[in-house]
Structure formats: C-alpha cells, structure tokens
Image: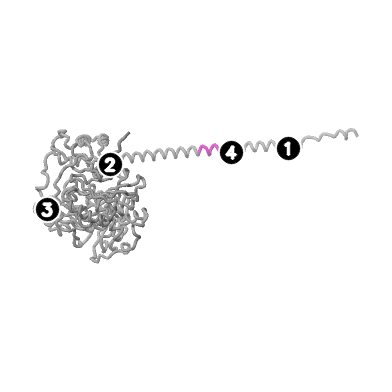
Amino acid sequence: MTTAPISMSHAPGEYLHSFPGGVKLRHYKRMSCLHPIARPPMPDKLSLPLKQHVGSIAEPVVTVGQTVLKGELLAKPNNPFGALLHAPTSGYISAIDQQPVISPEHATGACITLIPDNEDIWHPSCQRMIPDWRHMPKHELIEHIATAGIVGLGGAVFPTHRKLNTDFAPPIKTLILNGAECEPYISCDEMLMREHPEEVLLGGQILAHALETVEHIIIALEDQMGEVEDDFQRARRLIDDPRIRICRVRTIYPEGGERQLIKVLTGLEVPSGGYPQQLGIVCVNVGTAWSVKRALVDRVPLIERVVTVTGAVNDPRNWLTLLGTPVSHLLKISGGFKQNVSRLVMGGPIMGMAISDDSISITKGFNCLLALQTHQLRNPQQSMPCINCTECVRVCPAKLMPQMLFHSIRTDNTADSSNLSLQDCIECGCCDLVCPSHIPLTEYFRWGKSQLRSRLHEQQRATKSELRYRARETRLKTEQDQKQQRRVARQQAASDQQLAQQNIAAALARVRNKQAAPEKPNDQDSDK
C-alpha cells in the first residue's frame, strides 16, 4: 500500500516544504520602500515596443500621423501567444520604426512612438459597461482579460489568457498569487501589496472564477514582509473568502521562481518540460492579479505598471509608470545618479540585463531600474579551470549538474547537454555566486540553451523538409498510379468496343447468310 505524499494530505500552504539549493542574500529593499507609489510626470514622448510578450512581434493597427485616445488599440499579435498593445495616453503617432529595446537577441526593435497631448482623454471602449465578472462565463471572462493585453508581470510576460486556458489540464484546484519577491533591490510587488491588498485579492478572485474549479487561493509572501501580511489579513477579513490563505515563505533566493514556490507550498514538483497546470495549479504574479482587477472592474487595459527605481540614485522609490516611458525620464525624476555609477540594469543584480542606452523605454516586463556603483560590482577576474568542488550542484534549485553541463557546452556536445536537462536551467545565477573558479556558468548555460534551440529548429526544418519530400514522392506515385489506371481503363474500353463491333459484325453476317439461303419447299405442296 502506497502512502499519499504529504502535499496530498494537507491543504496547499498549510505545510511548507523545502526546495533544493538556493542562497541567502541581503535584500537592499528598504531604500525604495520609504515613499508610497507615485505617478511620474508625463514624458515628452512614449516609445512602445511591439514585442512585449512571448511569441512573435505584434502588428500595428495605427498609422503615422494618426490621433489616438488613451486605451485605444495600437497593435495586435498575429498568433495566439501574443498580447494586445494599447495607448497609455492620448496623443498622435509620430513614428513606427526601429529603436533601442531590451532584448537578449536584438539591440533594436520595431516601436510605436506616441507624442502625448497632455489631455489624457480615454477611448470610449475603455468606458463601456460590461457585466459583473461574477456572472460571466469562463470564455467571456478570459476574452476580456485578453482584450486588456495582460501578461505575466513577474518577468515571464506570458499572456495571461493563455495561462487560464486549461482545457488540456486536469481541474485547477489551487491558484497561487506570487508575492515572494526574492531578488535583491526589487520592491515593486511589495509596495503594490502594501498599498492595494484588497485589489490584489479581488484580482485573485476573478482569476479563480475564470478557472472555475479553484478551491484554494494562496498568497505567498516572504517572511520578512510582516507589515504586508497584516495588510492582507485586514483585506481578507473584508473580502471574506474562505479559500484565501496568506502564507509566509522563507527569504531565500530564488524561492520566488514559479517551480520553486510550487514545491514549497505543495510539495509537488512540476515535471521537466511540463507546466503547473498538469498538477492542477496555476501561479500568477500579484501584479498580474492587480491588472486583472483593473481590467474587469475599472475597465483599464494594461497601460502602466509599478517600476522600482533604486540603487545609486538620489531618490529611490517605486513609480506607477506608463508603458513607453523612457528610462532617462525615470532617472531624472528620481534625482539622477550618485557618483561612480558604472552600470544600469533592468531587473535585479543577479538575473537582470545591463542597459547601455537610457533611451530604452519601460515595457510590460520591466520591473526594476537598478543603478550600480563601481564598488557594488564583482571585480572582473580571470576564470580558472573547474576544480569539481560541486558547490554549484549544492545551490542549484533545479537539481542540475552545472559542472557537467559546463563541460558538455564547452565541448559542443549538445546531446549530453540535452540529456543533462540543460533546458530546465532557470538562469538564476546561484552557481555563479558560489563558483570559486569565477566561471560565468550562467552565460555558458544561456549560450548552450540558444544552441539547443538552434539545433531543435534545424531538426524541425529537416523534419519538415523530409515530410515535404515524402509527400511529394507519395503524390507523384499516386499520380503515376492514377495515370496507369486510366490507361488500363482506356485500353479495356477500347478492347470492349472492338469486341462489341466484332459481335455486331457476326450478327449481321448471320442475318445476311440467312437471307441469302434458298427457301426449303413444303412437303404438302410437293404431293400435289
């Protein structure tokens, strides 16, 4: 007789589990939490990249010179995995061209430039009355979320309406609102939860209604967020939903990762290459839940988000920023740089991406703008050979063998990299932090994953080419067989016609022979 795992005998969040690996880090969050969230002044222009989601680039539905209103549709995707893009304010379109963007693959991307008119006039579609979400069927509710252009605001920018489409999965029993903001310096989620706990919980209720079968709504907070927990407890009493549970998890990096948080709260592990939906779980960022509430209750599409501006700036704080706002504008209103700033980062100090151009604009996945001084950066050191100390194995939250992956990538052995589950690497950087040989392991893993994707694309192209070749051969053979069948049929028909003519000729010949034969005399006549 098998024993049910503890995660099946306890409600999610009632018993906390642990995940492998992880590192303890200082958070450096207090400096940006001293002031409430504020709205920055309107910038002179907004630059809106057409790719702010996973999948292919969106296609603009506006033209240069066109006047648009706040919330009006600017671009729509050409595949189901994209997200709509809306005007953050009213104004006119001055350009649709290539501009600097945040991307690991390209330095520039297609953008729509919007010049604000400072009138901030709403488009009528954003003021229309829609039915109460409590009375909406699932498909209609998901359609409204898709129309608002909402994506995951925790960094993955996966379209939320696609995550809610769980027809292929078992019934979703658990909804997790991820507020475990584990990377240092980033505090946008903490401030959002501190100031809008009721709206976050209401957004969670809307998501649970869209999933239909949810029995548990878990809000995950770090154990250092005592004040935030108090705010949520007050909001929970107001909302009075017995499904809601507030859980405080350890302050350890990278516990805010989706797979790690699910492991902590339920004890279940998302299978390699799989999705949480396969376990009956959906996990969304608290900022995403807040955006869902605004879309379904306030009729506001996703046109702004909370961004942390922190580090070596004179006035670190969180700003409720319009999409398309230039980084330079946020830096200016945050008091500018302190001395000796040597690096500007989008995101946190570990998983963030360096910014080389402050004309880059805020996107849906832009959660933090971090300025780092020279002394805050790791001293560049020459990488030394791996000594197989296995420290990287000890801290890896995905239970990988980083040192073996490193060797397979260096030798360009993609088969070994795939067998060692390189695709499961979450690029958290824990292995970099503990490596005594100063090997940039995460950079190797990113490159190795890109090579795996390239090989996979090559295999897919080769497979498609082979399928096309086989289809062509089958088609040609079918056509040849059909021609042969038609030829045989014609020959048979011709043969049948010739035989018919012979039969007719024989019949005519018999008739002529009969007519030509003399008539036999009658016996009675001969007696007379």
Say what amino acid the circle numbered 2 marks.
Answer: Ser
Reading the chain from its start, which is encountered first: label 3 or label 4? 3
Asked whether the residues under the numbered discs 3 and 2 touch, taking CB atoms below 8 Å apart as contact, a structural biologist would say no
Residue labelled with disc 1? 511
How far is mark 4 from mark 1, CA to CA? 27 Å
Say what amino acid the circle numbered 1 marks.
Answer: Val
Asked whether the residues under the numbered discs 2 and 1 touch, taking CB atoms below 8 Å apart as contact, a structural biologist would say no
Q: Quadrant of the C terminus?
A: top right
Reading the chain from its start, which is encountered first: label 4 or label 1? 4
Residue labelled with disc 2? 7
Foreground: disc 1 or disc 3: 3
Which label belongs to residue 493?
4
Reading the chain from its start, which is encountered first: label 1 or label 3? 3
From what the image shows, is residue 35 above or below residue 283?
below
Residue labelled with disc 3? 312
Count neighbours of disc 3 (C-alpha within 10 A) and say few if under 14, some if 14 to 19, many if 20 or more.
many
Count neighbours of disc 4 (C-alpha within 10 A) and say few if under 14, some if 14 to 19, many if 20 or more.
few
Which residues, given as a range, are shown in magenta? 483-491
Foreground: disc 3 or disc 4: 3
Provide residue 397's location: percent of width, then percent of height: 21, 40
**Per the image, is 315 magenta?**
no
Provide residue 17's location: percent of width, then percent of height: 23, 41
- Say which of 243 and 279 sits in front: 243
Secondary element at image label 4:
helix
Foreground: disc 2 or disc 4: 2
